[in-house]
């Protein structure tokens, strides 16, 4: 059974809630705004996932995010949930940390599809198996 | 505000069969020193004039938390203590100031993780239309996690005259979090005594979830004079001998007038005296020295409207 690997820590065993909370503490300690996103299509080219609420600015403690994560898991148990930490510092203005915090029981599977283009060139794309 | 790192010594799993060591003794005094709670309490004593019963209650709570911590080390108690509080008292009796200190005390005792204070009123919790209240309240609660949520004039949350009022929704969410996430945040409700009493009788859920009711007494005249002098000293002003006597008369006269708000009235009086002092120095049209710049005289106090009738 293959595991979807994207974002940080995805080659490690799934993080426990305690480890996730520690990562959130790290992000908040750096002044990053944490947000949650979910999707049922974790294709690597699928960049825009659905947002679970707005990014959580002005948080001081991981408990607030963990509460939202719990609610998101309950509402979308069969989705992938990603946590990202956004750094609004001038010059960065980007996501500094993103990792999966929830996977569905049945992981999404993809396969390589080959097609023939002009001049018999071969093109490959990843499609849902 | 800087956040000191907490030593996580208290996060010992409790009620564990292997934990209890009946022979081991916990030195409460050593625990007391470790938390540096005495410096916080000393600061509280020094910074706040009067408020004897309030300080007494804070001392009791600090002792209770310390003993609770010791009990945890022995594996005697498992559920975290309930620390939600209600501050009642007249305007200007220092409820917000004490709440700020409370956040830092609870943080030193390792009871809240971050020790920040989120101060809100009805407007921050209750929405304008259907479906607006719950996200708004949850947003505030998320921000307050790990610290203290201070709800000023809490009785405005409940508006019995309007049955469609959204305040009830905010109250229900608050109660739920107060019950289920006791270790994540402490809620302090504040307001004037009589109105809080009606609020609590209309919402029995709140009364049963709040264990600590602290009543803030009015200041007496001597305390108010002392407070004004402390305020002035913090801003680099001082009252001369006659001004101090005038100030005593002012307090007595001000108390009899409507809308007397204890320390807040004194702050306003001091601010107006500063204006008059500036005007006097300006109109004197002479070079001023350092002493003249920082001295408030009796004339500035006696010019108040309070003495005019």
Image (cartoon, helix red, strand yellow):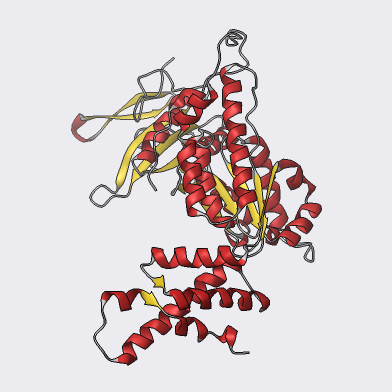
**Residue at figure coordinates x 65%, y 22% from the top left:** B77
Q: How many marks?
A: 0
Q: In which quarter of the image is the C terminus of chain A?
A: top left
Question: Toward which corner of the image does residue B252 lie, by quadrant?
Answer: bottom right
Asked whether the viewer can see residue A103, the reply is: no
Above or below for B78 versus B258? above
Residue B212 position, x and y percent, is 68, 43
**Residue at figure coordinates x 55%, y 11% from the top left:** B24
Above or below for B29 versus A32? above
In this rendering, position of residue B98 left or right of residue B255: left
Residue B108 position, x and y percent, is 48, 36
Give whichever of A12, B164 is nearer the camera. B164
Residue B103 position, x and y percent, is 52, 45
Give whichever of A56, B39 is nearer the camera. B39
**Residue at figure coordinates x 62%, y 78% from the top left:** B253
Give whichever of A37, B244 is nearer the camera. B244
In this rendering, position of residue B107 left or right of residue B126: left
Residue B15 position, x and y percent, is 63, 16
Asked whether the viewer can see residue A118, the reply is: yes
Above or below for A82 versus A57? above
Above or below for A60 versus A8? below
Determine the residue located farthest toward the front in the rendered image: B241
Question: Toward which corner of the image does residue B121 lie, by quadrant?
Answer: bottom right
Q: In which quarter of the image is the N terminus of chain A?
A: top left
In this rendering, position of residue A117 left or right of residue B52: left
């Amino acid at each position: 059974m293959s595991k979807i690997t994207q974002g940080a820590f995805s080659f490690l065993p799934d993080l426990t809630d305690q480890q996730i909370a520690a990562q959130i503490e790290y992000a908040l300690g750096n002044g990053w705004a944490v947000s949650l996103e979910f999707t049922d299509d974790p294709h690597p080219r699928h960049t825009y996932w659905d947002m679970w609420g707005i990014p959580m600015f002005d948080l001081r403690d991981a408990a607030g995010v963990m509460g939202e994560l719990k609610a998101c898991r309950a509402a979308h148990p069969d989705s992938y949930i990603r946590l990202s930490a956004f750094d609004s510092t001038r010059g960065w203005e980007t996501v500094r940390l993103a990792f999966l915090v929830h996977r569905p029981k049945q992981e999404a599977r993809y396969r390589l599809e080959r097609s023939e283009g002009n001049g018999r060139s071969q093109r490959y794309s990843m499609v849902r198996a | 505000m800087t956040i000191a790192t907490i030593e996580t010594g208290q996060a010992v799993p409790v009620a564990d069969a292997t934990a209890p060591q009946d022979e081991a003794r916990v030195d409460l005094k050593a625990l007391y020193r470790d938390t540096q709670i005495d410096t916080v309490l000393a600061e509280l004593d020094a910074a706040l004039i009067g408020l004897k019963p309030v300080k007494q209650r804070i001392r009791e709570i600090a002792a209770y938390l310390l003993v609770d911590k010791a009990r945890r080390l022995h594996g005697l108690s498992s559920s975290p203590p309930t620390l939600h509080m209600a501050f009642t008292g007249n305007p200007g009796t220092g409820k917000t100031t004490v709440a700020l200190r409370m956040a830092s005390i609870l943080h030193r005792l390792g009871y809240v993780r971050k020790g920040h204070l989120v101060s809100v009123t009805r407007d921050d919790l209750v929405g304008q239309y259907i479906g607006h209240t719950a996200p708004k309240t949850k947003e505030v609660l998320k921000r307050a996690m790990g610290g203290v949520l201070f709800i000023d004039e809490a009785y405005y949350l409940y508006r019995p005259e309007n049955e469609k009022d959204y305040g009830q929704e905010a109250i229900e969410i608050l109660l739920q979090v107060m019950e289920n996430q006791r270790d994540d945040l402490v809620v302090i409700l504040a307001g004037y005594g009589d109105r809080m009493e009606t609020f609590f009788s209309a919402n029995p859920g709140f009364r049963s979830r709040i264990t600590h009711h602290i009543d803030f007494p009015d200041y007496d005249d001597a305390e108010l004079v002392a407070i004004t002098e402390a305020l002035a000293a913090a801003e680099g002003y001082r009252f001369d001998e006659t001004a101090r006597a005038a100030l005593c008369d002012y307090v007595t006269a001000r108390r009899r007038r409507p809308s007397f708000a204890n320390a807040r009235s004194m702050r306003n009086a001091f601010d107006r005296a500063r204006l008059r002092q500036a005007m006097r120095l300006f109109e004197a049209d002479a070079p001023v020295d350092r002493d003249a710049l920082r001295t408030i005289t009796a004339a500035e106090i006696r010019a108040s409207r309070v003495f005019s009738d």
